[in-house]
Amino acid sequence: VTLTGGASVTSTPATAPLGGGAFSVTGMDATSLTDGAVTVAMTITDVAGNSTPFTGTAATKDTAPPTIITSFGIASGPSNPVNVINSLTEGAASLDVNWDASMAGTEVATFTFTSSGGGGPLTSGPHTAPCGGGAQTLLGIDLTALAEGTVTITVELVDAAGNTANGNASSIGGGRDNLTSNNTATIGGGLHNEAGSLATVGGGSYNTASGAHSAVGGGLRNSVNGSFSTAPGGHMNRAKGDFCFAAGRRAQADHSGAFVWGDSNDIDKGSSANDQFNVYASGGTRLFSNATATTGVQLAPGAGSWSTVSDRNAKERFEAVDGREVLKRLAEVPITTWSYKAQEDEIRHMGPMAQDFYAAFGLGVGAESIDTIDPDGVALAAIQALHANQVEKEAEIAELRAEIASLRQALAHVLPHGARD
């Protein structure tokens, strides 16, 4: 027997029963066949070696699990808010189910209820999915045996081919009018929060985490739509791109890999490119490079350049500088224009190479970088040397002028009157 569907699988020879009749060929490994139509063919060979091919009825391979139910949760009622079971409804709770549109009407679902306080698990089902999916409310579920606590609802969906899909409803720890989808979405509490598949909302109000593996810690009206993104809290922050971070107030990380911190000003503060680091801080920005915050840089409010710590009290091991020697060495350092390999060709810069600068002055952390404060110091020392040279030259010139004037006076007494001109 040979099965064909994207690949071919042939059974070991099987001997026909004496007198004919039905028999089974077992042990055929069909894992290499693709889902879909499968052709069944058989070759019968007698003891004389004569063969007759035979094509059997086409079969179907279906190993794909059915689509998970879109969402489900405890229905609200006249005596209980959504996702809350109280003493009035525990004996006949209702479950709101949103079936996926792909439902063929042959799938059946079994729901399991467990409580963090114990007393379970309890099951409800099997329930047959409506053809075409849609919203449905399952009534009369007896949950009286569950102890008080956070109730977790899981579903097992089985299609006509016997394939099974499991989905987990998020635990909702408390709060009011919170909504979770299946697949381990979680809401800790709060008001009107929504968590999608594989997402988490810790608390707060009107927060939404819909991206896969996304999270909102809390706050008010924060939304995380990108996968693997987060908004830890704050107000009206949005992490739309994947792998994003948005925090503070009205921070909008709309590009993949973007980080946006927004200050308290009530205006939108967004990203403009992928993998971009954005900080909106109208009160200034400080970056410290030691544990005691005595050294670092500061971007003052409204400023366009960094201020570095240069306090005398933050420094030690002072040594005098020979400005003329600095000037001499600086004159030998090549200064060129160039482009960074990581930037566009049209972006140009001017300055020395770190290797040349370090060889000339030995300043900074190494021969592959230049601390911005060091070229400033070199330039100031060179300027002082030039100034000293200028003062010396001016003094020398003044002395020469005085000598010339003295010589002129001496010549005036020696030369005849007519030769003075």
Image (cartoon, rainbow, N blue to C red):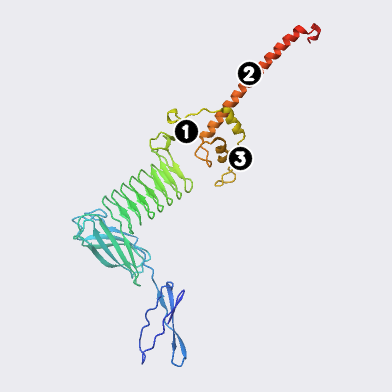
Location of residue 23 with respect to 132 vertically, above or below: below
Number of residues whose C-alpha sits closer than 10 Å to that of mark 1, classed few (under 14), some (14–19) or many (20 or more): few
Marks 3 and 1, how far apart in space?
A: 25 Å
Real-space Cα separation, disc 3 to disc 2, in angstroms: 38 Å
Estimate the spatial distance between the alpha carbons at disc 1 and disc 2, rounded to whole Å: 38 Å
Please give the label number shown on residue 337: 3
Q: Are marks 3 and 1 in contact (CB under 8 Å)?
A: no
In primary-sequence order, the first of circles 3 and 2 is 3
Using the image as rendered, state which of residue 279 and residue 153 is in the foreground: 279
Q: Is residue 50 left or right of residue 352?
A: left
Q: Are marks 1 and 2 in contact (CB under 8 Å)?
A: no
Q: Where residue 245 sits: x, y (%)?
A: 41, 47
Which percent across, then down, holds residue 166?
Answer: 32, 64
Q: Position of residue 264 (x, y in %)?
A: 38, 38
Q: Secondary structure at mark 1?
A: strand
Neighbor class of circle 2 (other Cα within 10 Å; few <14, some 14-19, many 20+) is few
Q: Are marks 3 and 2 in contact (CB under 8 Å)?
A: no
The quadrant of the picture occupied by the C terminus is: top right
- Residue named by callout 1: 307
- Give the residue furthest to the right: 418
Q: Amino acid at mark 3?
A: Thr
The residue mark sitting in front, 1 or 2, is 2
Q: Nearer the viewer, mark 3 or mark 2?
A: 2
